[in-house]
Amino acid sequence: MAGFADIALLVYNMTLNCTNYTNFTIVDDNNCSFPEEPTAEPLLFFAPPEWLVQFARISYGLVGLLGLGGNTLVIYVVLRFSKMQTVTNMYILNLAFADEMYLFGLPFLLTTMIFHSWPFGRIMCKVYMTTTSINQFTSSLLLTVMSADRYVAVCHPISSPRYRTPFIAKFICLTAWTVSALLMVPIYMYASTLEQGEYINCNIYWPENSYMNGEMAFCLYAFTLGFAVPLILILLFYFLVICRLRTVGPKKKSKEKKRTHRKVTYLVLSVVTVYILCWLPYWCAQLWLTFMPHYAGQTTISLTMMLFTQCLAYANSAMNPVLYAFLSDNFKKSFAKAFTCASRGEVNAQLHVENSFFPKTKSGSSRQADRKGGTSNTAKTVAIDSNREIDQSSNVTATMTDGASLRNGDVKPETAVTEV
């Protein structure tokens, strides 16, 4: 097992290396025949067919180009346009960054595929194995957080503004990265290189244990914390969200607000669904590769399956920007304007106002602007005609009332700001 992150690295390190077995024979160009009792367990003893290597190289290259370009665009538009800086988009921003960093590992993988050897040294082997695993694990945690965020927004609309704030979103993202880094410490400890003749393998060499070897123990550890538990929580949150959306009628929530809640929920649900479809085959292959006898997986069919699941996992990091473009009006408009000379103000004016992340203005946050606006507007009314004075006084009263409601966390469902 190539650790938590990379079946493909294991497969592409595979060369005609049967030196750890005694009395082996070459069956054909790619296979070795082994006795029932080998003197040592081989790390690598099968070379995948050349057509499979070429196909995988092209696939990984296309996925890398599409994914790096798409996630860079997501990061750019969220950071550039203030109305894109919502709580949901804060999680999407971190997810895009994790996907981008995960895809940065592809050049190392492609190089290994070409040379059938790891040419970057022991330190880079540790860095590669650790960072890809951290980014993969962080993506899983962030999707769980996004599902929980949808649950809070949809099922608890009155109290949600109190918990869905920029500070809390940033703190949660930082916590997700920290937890992922701590959980992947074992990979950094045991990732290393091993020379086998003219080839150098980058792998994770686990210490043996009398009850369960390190490879099996870590596979279960990573699968449980990195996929199974997040998947259970995601399904639970979305079960509650869907039940809520089906039961809330127009009397409790306006049609427009219900529509916008559905759009954001469907966007996050689509991202989660694609993640599960892409990563479930990968984890099935990881578990099979770990617990089955080693020579059970050394056939063209099994290697093709393993490479396909790994490519599918990498492809997931490239699919998210495509989902944003098709399912989010704001992302669609922002992507289009990112390739024009439109100013930030022009783009922001075309975007829907979104909730829970009150963008900064020159005079401070929007809440502060509202409170300041209450005083400044009152002063201005002295110098204008009576009709405008009446209109502006009404606006001031409404602004101050809304501000007080927000500060007290007393937001009515029909007046809460929504996100699209």
Image (spheres, rainbow, N blue to C red):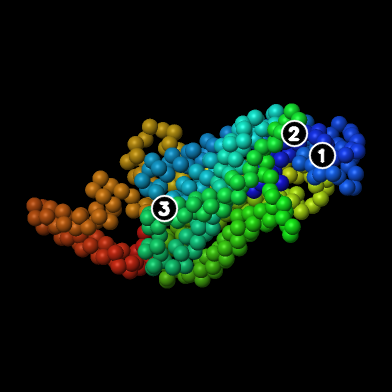
Position of 354 with respect to 193 (left or right) is left
Label 2 SS: strand
Q: Are marks 2 and 1 in contact (CB under 8 Å)?
A: no
Residue located beneath label 3 in the image? 170
- Estimate the x, y position of residue 147 in percent, counting from the top left: 52, 59
Q: Residue at x 33, y 69 (%)?
A: 410
> Relative to residue 359, is residue 154 depicted above or below?
below
Residue 90: image x %, image y %?
44, 50
Q: CA distance from mark 2 to mark 1?
A: 10 Å
Q: Residue at x 25, y 45 (%)?
A: 362
Amino acid found under the numbered disc labelled 1: Asn
Quarter of the rendering containing residue 303:
top right
| Secondary structure category for the residue under label 1 | loop
Q: For the view shown, which residue lies furthest in the left direction?
A: 383
Name the front one of labels 1 and 3.
Answer: 1
Q: Which residue is mark 2?
A: 196
Amino acid at dot 2: Gln
